[in-house]
Image (tube, helix red, strand yellow):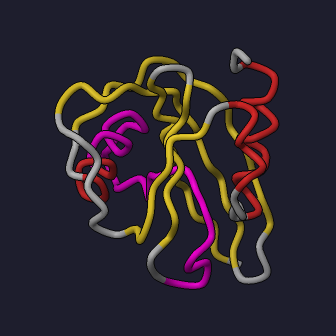
Amino acid sequence: MKTLNVVAAIIKKDNQVLATKRGYGEFINMWEFPGGKIEPDETKEEALIREIKEELDCTIKPAKFALDLEYQYPTFYLKMSCFEAVITEGTPKLLEHNDARWLAKDELNDVNWIPADLTIIDYLKETMED
């Protein structure tokens, strides 16, 4: 079975996190933390910066490592490294997603998350301020 090594950005602003609604593929219209595949010879941080530039046309700075998670989907195995990040340049534009929302801690359950990203929600419920 194929293993995907990916990164995800937990982009924070004013005690909220950015959630994006997937605009394509198997999980279309489900919510996720933006990011994507790590290319050969790329660090996780470099991959994250590149993916956010490609998906949201803005520049981020990974502020701190948050967590690693693994999830078994029916057709592939996911290994994801998640980083808290801040936008340093630009405003998110929806280039690959069909919606985006800034969510406070008490709004994290308001959207239909991709299954693997529920582990990030658990992390945020423990670490975000009310």
**Above or below, 44 relative to 78:** above
Q: Residue at x 41, y 53 (%)?
A: 38
Q: Is residue 84 left or right of residue 111?
A: left
**Above or below, 88 relative to 43:** above
Residue 60 x, y percent position in the rendering = 30, 32
**Tally of numbered discs:** 0
Residue 86 x, y percent position in the rendering = 38, 25
Q: Residue at x 51, y 27 (%)?
A: 84
Q: Is residue 87 magenta?
A: no
Q: Residue at x 55, y 56 (%)?
A: 5
Q: Nearer the viewer, residue 24 or 104?
A: 104
Q: Nearer the viewer, residue 56 or 129?
A: 129
Residue 45 x, y percent position in the rendering = 38, 33
User: In which quadrant of the rendered image does the C terminus lie?
Assistant: top right
Q: Nearer the viewer, residue 48 or 118?
A: 118
**Above or below, 64 relative to 56:** above
Q: Is residue 64 left or right of residue 31?
A: left
Magenta range is 25-50
Q: Is residue 41 magenta?
A: yes
